[in-house]
Amino acid sequence: MRKSDSIFSNFIWRFLERCGAQGVTFIVSIILARLLDPGVYGTVALVTVFTTIMQVFVDSGLGNALIQKKGADDTDFSTVFFFNISACTILYAGMFFAAPLIASFYEKPELTPIVRVLSLTLIISGVKNVQQAYVSRNLLFKKFFFATLGGTIGAAIVGIVMAYLGFGVWALVAQSLFNQTVDTIILWITVKWRPKRRFSWQRLKVLFSYGWKLLASSIIEVVYNDIRSLVIAKLYTSEDLAFYNRGKHIPNLIVTNINASIDSVLLPTMSAEQDNKDRVRAMTRRAIKTSTYLMMPLMVGLAICAESIVSLLLTDKWLPSVLFLRIFCFTLAFHPIHTANLNAIKAMGRSDMFLKLEIIKKIVGLTALAVTMWISVEAMAYSLLFTTFITQIINSWPNKKLMNYSYIDQLKDMLPQIILSAGMGAIVYCVNFLNLSSILTLLIQIPLGVAIYVTGSKLFHLESFAYVWTIVKGFLHRKKKAGNDDEKDKNDAEQAEH
């Protein structure tokens, strides 16, 4: 199999895994949103902020270091595995004893047991982390598909049943814990790698010299992304936090699918080509053009249809989340572009530059937050539009020198998709003036938007459309050919038996 075919095949498996998992999660979230009050979601969202921050330490940047390192062997993987287990145990102990302090700070005594139980996901993730790095390094993304989907479907059943039986917030806690556990078990069954009785402080030091900068960058990134939730929980109400997070959740489902797929495949692929700047530039450019082509129409369309979608799926009690949903659509639309630029920097071993970029971006973002946090939750959300534009420029800046691919060049590559998406959105928005029911409005807007975007892509000869269409046809042809070959082998075997 050619290298480009292997890359795309792994992208497809990773994309299917994310789509399957997030699709099930989305359906379950709709059911749970109907069964549970917004305040319940606000409580779990608050606890999740702390576990998400702790989750960063689980990886310690060492997972990416294993992927990036040339010639990583069993000693490297085993060293990171035992280090992670020890670190996760310490982190859980810290969360266990910190739980009453968190509950006291937010004046919610019920948080103590929730924090202690939900933090068990830290230990589970520590067991799974190196297996994930092994899968990513060896481009075995089909393994993720079965592990993630198994955990997600099982967790969906647990969450819905417990919510229906009146367990409230514990339905969401059990859902998260069950998902992580089953995901880890399946991954360990399907991935053959096992830790050896090896540990090397020298290897750990080498890996950590690269990984600690990514760890620091990730901590800054996660704390920055979640600090708004912490501020909202303290200054405003649980309902405000629930509406804010729900508005972020829906577009994030789409972005996560595409972005996680690109991120997982790009880093190991770029790392393998790190000494060839022309190849890294070509892959970065392709990732930006393709992700923009896929992401822009989805985010514009979702923003246009936001009110109808929320009213139809979540009921009118969640309508206050529509404004946040639209804001996040426009901010998250550019997320895969950040990913492509940053992966190029990581792949070339410049984790020092990666850390510097994170510090600069967060200074800009925190300044915007400090100005708006006392005004309203809406003002805090609007500040993201400003910071998104600035961070695009910051993330792309080093790549002008590293591989001669400036932000202006990137903007030129993105512009056709952005203009076509905006035109499609303007036409689709006009359907709202017909004052139809939510479901009828969506039944007109969605196929109309798809038709306009695809037709426009053909009329204006968008290179990204031609690329995606050619790759998809090639992938389907290979799958069909493989199926025919399997059928032929089966027939030959039956004839041989006779």
Image (tube, rainbow, N blue to C red):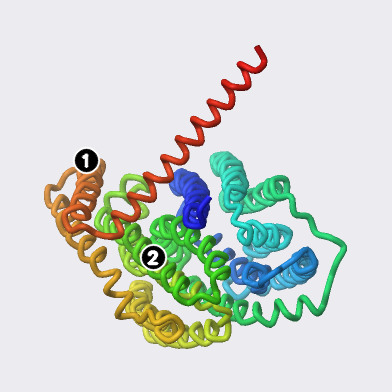
Question: In the rendered image, which quarter is residue 213 located in?
Answer: bottom right
Residue drawn at x 61%, y 52% as measured from the top left: 140
Residue 171 appears in the figure: no
Pick the quarter of the image with the C terminus: top right
Residue annotated with mark 2: 286
Q: What element does badge 2 sit on?
A: helix
Nearer the observer: mark 2 or 1; the answer is 2
Q: Position of residue 479 (x, y in %)?
A: 47, 39
Residue 107 appears in the figure: yes
Residue type, numbered disc 2? Arg
Residue annotated with mark 1: 440
Q: CA distance from mark 2 to mark 1?
A: 37 Å
Question: In the rendered image, which quarter is residue 218 located in?
Answer: bottom right
Q: Position of residue 99 (x, y in %)?
A: 68, 69
- Is 225 or 359 nearer to us in this picture? 359
Residue drawn at x 68%, y 72% as measured from the top left: 62
- Is 422 or 377 nearer to us in this picture? 422
Residue at the outermost right position: 197
Above or below, comparing residue 71 to residue 249 in the picture: below
Above or below, comparing residue 417 to residue 34 in the picture: below
Residue drawn at x 44%, y 85% as measured from the top left: 398
Above or below, comparing residue 475 to residue 195 in the picture: above
Q: Position of residue 220 (x, y in %)?
A: 55, 80
Q: What element does badge 1 sit on?
A: helix
